[in-house]
Amino acid sequence: MKKQPVQHPSQWVEPLARFGYAAKGVVYGIVGLLAAQAAVSAGGKTTDTQGALSAIVTQPFGKVLLSVVALGLLGYVLWRFVQAIKDPENKGTDAKGLAQRLGYAGNGLIYASLALSAVKIVFGLGNSTNSNSTQDATASLLSQPFGQWLVGTIGALIIGLGFYQFYQAFTAKFRKELDLNQLSDPEKKWVTGIGRFGLAARGIVFCVIGFFLIQAARQSDASKVRGLGEALQALEQQPYIPWLLGTVAVGLVAYGIYMVIQARYRRLVTN
């Protein structure tokens, strides 16, 4: 009997990674669409990525669609762990490289939790994430020695991550990660504009979340913490900038589209 060729791991890591970027894009796109509807009083609501999963399952063939998204998110998690452990992009083992690889691993854990939530919803076990889990975790940190400093530092780091998104949007260095040679110049400009808008909107959300974490640290009050959905709600409540939520919402839709673009055009080194 003729032996079947053994498939190298990189041959299945890459399609799963691309599928993962697309699934992440769908989730962020739904968050943005719902927030945009809320901004124009069209029946939407500000929600987070968990809420986006719940929105998917209510659609026709919702469980099938959510199962596909869950599989995609697991592919994204796998890719993040490959980046962290195998270091295919040669980030190295110096302080900067290790920080980036730890960031990949942390990002993988976050989306692993989201994928688990999707699986539980599909099987009718409800959303596995308590809506107050972020506040509970913050309260636990605040109860520790130097807890206020720790929570405040985390808040500052998240704001720093927000400013890094602004930096990426301004410099458009993300284009180096994409293989856009087959696109025309106008198409490349569209990709750049969408990426910039999406990253800037995500940066605003990170800054809002970090700000509330610092407030929680200053007042030693975990109830001040806000997640993604509540950060969008805070933008909605700004009386002097009524268009802010709508702008950020459309930006999150753009970020979702940018993730789908990543799924198609990102340069992936898997070995």
Image (spheres, helix red, strand yellow):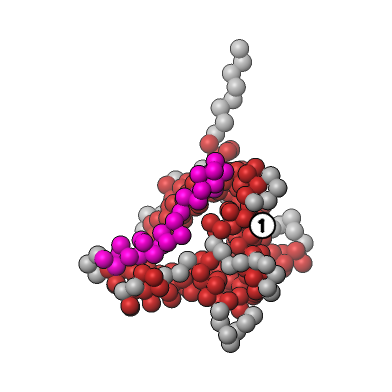
Does the stretch in magenta take in 86?
no
- Residue plotted at (65% across, 47% down): 62
Residue 67 appears in the figure = yes
Say which amino acid is labelled 1: Ile
Q: Position of residue 226 (x, y in %)?
A: 45, 69
137 over 89 or under it: above or below: below
Near-viewer residue (202 or 9):
202
Q: Is residue 157 left or right of residue 249?
A: left
Q: Position of residue 38 (x, y in %)?
A: 64, 70
Near-viewer residue (225 or 199):
225
Residue underneath mark 1? 261
Q: Which residues are magenta?
A: 117-143
- Residue plotted at (56% across, 58% down): 51
Q: Helix or strand or loop: what does disc 1 sit on?
A: helix
Tally the marks: 1
Q: Position of residue 215 (x, y in %)?
A: 38, 77
Residue 77 appears in the figure = no
Q: Position of residue 46 (x, y in %)?
A: 58, 67
Classed neighbour count for the residue bearing mark 1: other residues with Cα under 10 Å, few (<14), some (14–19), many (≥20): many
